[in-house]
Amino acid sequence: MGSGFEIKNGELILKINPKVYPLERVYATAYIFLDKYYFILDGDKEKEIILKVKPKDPKQNMEKFSYEFFEEMLSITNYFNQYEKNKDMIKLILQRALFSLIPEPASKELEKEYEKLHQEIKNAV
């Protein structure tokens, strides 16, 4: 079973291999095109995902759109695959960046000054 498409009565039917393009990637790709197309999701997420697409503007070239959809889905799949490979490194870099912003503990002199100011404020109220 492979991915492909057919056009019937102005409706595009995309057949998607979930081993190549997981369901989450299909959702993400369809979301990008919601302003111009209606989508109906069907099929089996383990065997074959079927996505029926109807244009909001009947003048849309559905064959061209099918290639654009698969191209965008490939890009999204690649993005998430790269993210999965690099997520530990990304996490480490973010942790180091955030930890470098943690202020050093206050010195004894600063703590005494803080207590003095705090006491003055309490007395003023």
Image: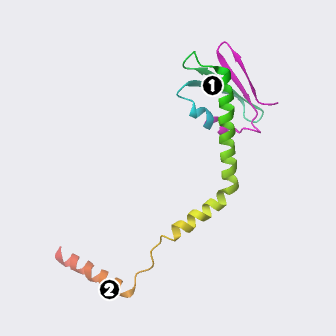
Q: Give the range drawn in magenta.
A: 1-27
Q: Work out which residue is located at the far bottom of the displayed protein and give it.
A: 108
Whether pointer 1 and pointer 2 mark residues with C-beta atoms closer than 8 Å, the reply is no
Residue drawn at point x = 66 percent, y = 24 percent: 64
SS of the residue under disc 1: strand
Q: In this view, does 3 lie to the left or right of 93?
A: right
Residue drawn at point x = 68 percent, y = 51 percent: 82
Residue drawn at point x = 63 percent, y = 25 percent: 40
- Which of the numbered marks, if any, corresponds to residue 100? none
Q: Work out which residue is located at the far right of the displayed protein and give it.
A: 1
Where is residue 45 shown, x and y percent of the image? 72, 35
Q: Write down the residue under mark 1.
A: 40
Q: Work out which residue is located at the far top of the displayed protein and give it.
A: 9
User: As shown in the figure, which amino acid type bears the numbered disc 1?
Assistant: Ile
SS of the residue under disc 2: helix
Q: Write down the residue under mark 2.
A: 112
User: As shown in the figure, which amino acid type bears the numbered disc 2?
Assistant: Lys
Where is residue 78 shown, x and y percent of the image? 69, 44
Vertical arrangement, residue 120 with respect to residue 48, above or below: below
